[in-house]
Image: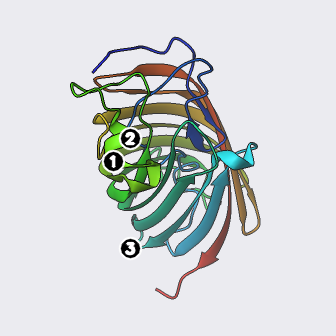
């Protein structure tokens, strides 16, 4: 395989990881999730929510999640992530994982939920997609996508781990930071590690939750390595569960 590097930044725009690399031919297995979560502790122990995340460039994709409480501190999360309508790699993946929240780390016991929160997340994903560079020719002179087919013919899978820390300044407003590492593999593509770090605000308007975030992200594999700025957002509706 021919090795190449892309000097221009990777942009993970408002929730969708997208290698916006004019004049560059990336190769990567897709990220399991191209967006993050809002502030830790944004939900009460007995609440779940449905959330949509997306991008101002609609053709680049969208995502969504459904976290449901297992107990006061643990949530089961089912998520989906997709990117369609581009020539730089398409994918659709679903993930299942858990999120553990450590509440009131400052021991304020504030009735409005003000204070410091942290959480840990982890899980696995499965789907299809990725991107094969035309520069990556194998020993037989074939491009990987010639042997496997299009993006939608590549089975992709992997796992992720992440952590967050946030401070709820007052009931409707919090600030937070998050980091996440993901490892993915897809047929005919190099195994890829994705890393991201973001900070941002989280707002509560009754049952509606809104977060915005900006930071840095990138991917690394045997063929490619790219880093650059990222921007994202999510809108959620929270509800009480029956347990």
Q: Secondary structure at mark 1?
A: helix
Q: How many marks?
A: 3
Label 3 or label 1, whichever comes before in sequence order? 3
Residue 32 in view: no
The residue mark sitting in front, 3 or 2, is: 2
> What residue does disc 3 label?
71
Give the CA distance from mark 1 to mark 2: 5 Å
Camera-nearest residue between 10 and 107:
10
> What residue does disc 2 label?
145
Residue at 64% over, 49% down: 85
Give the CA distance from mark 3 to mark 1: 43 Å
Residue at 39% over, 14% down: 4
Neighbour class for label 2 at 10 Å: few (<14), some, many (≥20)?
Answer: many
Identify the image quadrant of the N terminus.
Answer: top left
The residue mark sitting in front, 3 or 1, is: 1
Q: Indicate whether 76 appears above or below 87.
A: below
Camera-nearest residue between 49 and 190:
190
Locate residue 222 relative to residue 229 in the image: left or right. Answer: left
Label 3 or label 2, whichever comes before in sequence order? 3
Give the CA distance from mark 3 to mark 2: 45 Å
Circles 3 and 1 in contact, beta carbons < 8 Å: no
Circles 1 and 2 in contact, beta carbons < 8 Å: yes
Neighbour class for label 1 at 10 Å: few (<14), some, many (≥20)?
Answer: some
């Amino acid at each position: 395989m021919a090795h190449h590097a892309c000097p221009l930044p990777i942009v993970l725009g408002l929730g969708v990881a997208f290698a916006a690399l004019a004049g560059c031919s990336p190769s990567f297995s897709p990220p399991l999730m191209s967006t993050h979560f809002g502030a830790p502790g944004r939900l009460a122990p007995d609440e779940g929510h449905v959330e949509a995340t997306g991008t101002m460039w609609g053709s680049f994709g969208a995502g969504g999640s459904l976290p449901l409480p297992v107990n006061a501190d643990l949530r089961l999360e089912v998520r989906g992530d997709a990117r369609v309508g581009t020539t730089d790699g398409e994918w659709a993946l679903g993930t299942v994982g858990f999120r553990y929240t450590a509440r009131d780390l400052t021991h304020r016991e504030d009735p409005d939920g003000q204070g410091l929160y942290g959480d840990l997340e982890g899980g696995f994903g499965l789907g299809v997609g990725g991107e094969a560079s035309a520069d990556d020719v194998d020993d037989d002179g074939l491009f990987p996508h010639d042997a496997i087919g299009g993006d939608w013919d590549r089975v992709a899978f992997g796992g992720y781990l992440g952590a967050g820390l946030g401070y709820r300044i007052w009931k409707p407003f919090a600030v937070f930071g998050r980091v996440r590492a993901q490892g993915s593999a897809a047929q005919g593509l190099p195994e890829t590690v994705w890393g991201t770090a973001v900070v941002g605000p989280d707002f509560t308007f009754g049952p509606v939750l809104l977060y915005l975030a900006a930071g840095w992200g990138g991917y690394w594999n045997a063929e490619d390595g790219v880093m650059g700025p990222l921007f994202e957002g999510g809108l959620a509706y929270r509800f009480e569960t029956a347990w």
